[in-house]
Each structure stands twice: as C-alpha cells, then as structure tokens.
Image (cartoon, helix red, strand yellow):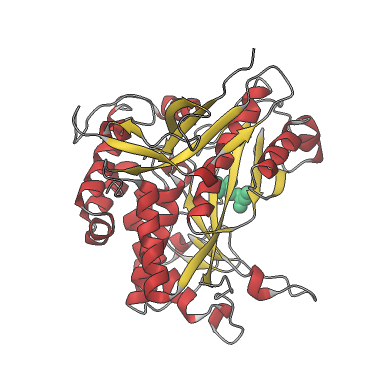
Amino acid sequence: MKHKEIIMACICDYAGQVRGKGYLSGLGETGKPGGIGLAPTNLMITAFGDIVNSPWGSCGEILMMPVPETEVTVEFISEQATERFVLCDLQELDGSPWNCCPRNWLQRGLDILENEFGLCVNAAFEHEFHYSGVPKRLGNAYGLDAMRLQGMFANTVVNALQANAIEPEMFMPEYGPQQYEVTCAPAIGLAAADRAVRLREIVRSVARNFGHKATFAPVMGVGMVGNGVHLHYSLVDKSGKPKTYNPDAPHCLDSDAACFTAGILRAMPEFIALTAPSAVSYERLQPHRWSAAYNNLADKDREAGVRICPLPKLPDTDPHARFNLEYRAADATANPYLVLGALVWAGIDGLKSKLKLPETMLGDPGVLPEEELQARGIQRLPTSLEKALDMLEQSERLKAWMGNEFHNAYLVNKRSELSLLDGLDPDEQVRRYAECY
Ligand code: GLU
Ligand code: MG
C-alpha cells in the first residue's frame, strides 16, 4: 500500500515554539492547501503549552498560508516516517497580512529598509544546544573526544541541513558538557529567520531519530554555561553588494551600518523581551557568562551586547564579503522573526535619526562609574523577564513599530508564561524550560 505523507503546516509562535496542523500531501490542484484556519488565540499558547489569557478568547479566524520555499523534508534510514513540515504566514481571511504575525512584522521592517534606504540585511543565526546522546565526560570542553562521542549525529544533522538548502558551515563541541554548536551561511532578509526556525527543528528531529533530545533552552542549570543564539548581520544593497565595510571609517564600519547598529544599541533594553523572552533568559544574560549583560559595543570582547567581528588580515580574504557584526543577547526561546525584526526596526530608527555610533569598549562595563556609563549610553540590560516586559510595555518606539494589537498580544502571552512559574524555585524553572525547548 502506498502511504500518503502528512505535511505539518507550522508557525513559529511568540514563545519560539513551532506548532501546526498536518495536511495530506497532494491536497488541492497545486498540491498545497489554500490556507488552514486558525484561532488567533492559538498564538496565546504559552511556552509550556497552556493558554492562560487571551485578548481574543474563542473569537476570530485567521489563515495559515504555507510558504513553499520553507518546506523541510528529513528522510531517515530507519523505519521512522519522513519528517515534512512547511512554515506559514498568518493572514486575514481576505489574504491580507495579520497584524500580529511575527513573520509579517519582520517583512514590514525589511520593506521599509529596502524602500527608504535601498538596504537589505544579510544574516546568520548561530545556535548552541545540548545533545542528550553523549555522556557528560569531565574535561571535554571543545574536545575532539566530545566530537567523537556524538557518533553519527553531527553528520546526520549537517546532511539534513544541506538537503534542505540551509548551507551548514560549522558543527563543533562547545564549552559545556553535552553542548554543541551549529552554524549556517547567511541569507538575505526573511530567509535568514526561516533558516533559524528550520535548523532548530531539523536538529531536534535528528536527535529524536537517534532516541535522544536536542535542547535549546538558554540554560540547563542555575549557574551553568548558557546556550546562546548569536545573530551575525551585515547590510547589503538591493543587488546584494556588501555595504558594511569601509576601511576609512571608524572600526571600518560604513556610515549606514554604523547608524543601523547605533539604533540597535539604543533600543536594546526596550526590545530585549523579544530576543531574550523567557524567565531563564536572564539567568544567561549575566556578566562573566560570555553572553551579554549590557547594550555595549566592542570589537574584541565576547561579552558585548553587539560585537564588531574582527577580520583576519590575510591575503585572499575579501573584507567586504566577510565583515559583519554579532548581536549576542538572543536565545532560542525567542522567535527568530522577532529577533531579526527587532534589529531591523531599531536599525531603521538609527538610520532615520542618523544616530552616532557609541564608542567601543573592552571588558566589564559593570566596573565603570554610573556617570561614565551614562556618558557612553551604556545601560545594564533588564535583569528579569518581568522588568524586560515592563520596559517593552512602556516603550513608545516598540508600540509604534509593532502596532498596539501586536504589542499588547505579546505582553499578554509573555506575562501568562510568567504566571505559570509563580512559586517555583529557579531549579524547577530551568527544568521546565529545558523540557520545553
Ligand atoms: N555560550 C555562550 C552564550 O551563552 C557563548 C559562548 C561563545 O562565545 O560561543 O552566549
Ligand atoms: Mg559558541
């Protein structure tokens, strides 16, 4: 008997969780359904799977519209069914974009960047995660033995990424026990965020096939090393020509890229609830954890909020093609469309107001006196999700960029998530996030 295949039509929700509905391949004349109905309140499912509160209740109807170029197929040698899923835009019944769709929010920002400034973003998300299929052996940080221990997992992951045109570049053991990192080539605009969502799910799928679990939670234990998502970005013009490197400018940063980055640094404390959106994100975003605790800029410091990635000065390296910056305060509890969207909307604001780039610094900003921090425009990032959500709520910028309905829906969703943690100690909170991501 020939089996019909089930394709999951999915969205990445506000908690970065991928959820959806399965349909049978070959449906309709084009082989794609014309749109799958969804209740807006589906977006109010919290990270932990419960709906606590919703601005829409049981009312309303939106459509999941599959985006064919995001389709993923992961074939397994074993008996396990082929995994197939496709990402969707969320639309109104008349086909217009739904105001509260994360993918569309990013698209709206990208359109402004391109139409008003002639610029596009080239971006790549680096992912750290834990793989349960290896023992926690002492001394294995970055170790060849840690690579050996994972067996066929890494090869299967990179082959599946390649088969889905995600262009994997590196797979390496990371610092923590059972921790690995996978990177892929940059892509322009929406495709970069699509890649991040597809990559996470491919890694999870392969881990499940090996009878294990890949966990992308920001931390796996209180006080332990974090799993970061570092977003590398540069600007290109409409034809794809790099527009970031200028050897005559401070830090070799071309003027548009400097304004764009200044905008990101300025708004970072206000939008951090979009890029580090879970209670345990703030366990990771602490000084001396090699993540980011301030909205500071550095060129050779892996604890900066934004890092200007230094270039090797070797013959045969094209600085224009390689030069990029790295936003370090994101993790995989964040929706990649919201992470890139926050950077794009903040960058546009920086370009519009021709914002000056702050000075770079090395080392812990926490040792500087308060007046100097203020003079440099450096702020400690909010230290809890609660505080980050308060800043998001009060931010006129974010309200304007997101629109009131989306801004409010996001706050309701994230505060609902927090309410589910009431009374739980930090270890139990970490455990729950690790189970869900
Ligand atoms: N694991 C660190 C983080 O939480 C990053 C380490 C690195 O620079 O690769 O972001
Ligand atoms: Mg790393």
Residue 126: image location, x then y, percent:
59, 50
Question: Image check: 274 left or right of 172?
Answer: left
Q: Nearer the viewer, residue 299 or 201?
A: 201
Residue lying furthest bottom: 248
Q: Is residue 56 left or right of residue 45?
A: left
Q: Nearer the viewer, residue 16 or 119?
A: 119
x, y percent for residue 69: 54, 46
Q: In the image, what residue occupies the spot 40% across and 69% down?
A: 113
In the depicted structure, whether residue 263 falls above or below residue 252: above
Please, which residue is most extreme toward the top here? 1
Question: Is 267 situated above or below 177?
Answer: below
Question: Is residue 244 or residue 181 the one in the foreground?
Answer: 244
Q: Residue at x 26, y 44 (%)?
A: 94
The quadrant holding residue 71 is top right
- Location of residue 433 with respect to 97 vertically, above or below: above
Residue 401 picture location, percent across and down: 28, 59
- Locate the N terminus and report the quarter of the image it occupies: top right
Residue 79, picture quadrant: top right
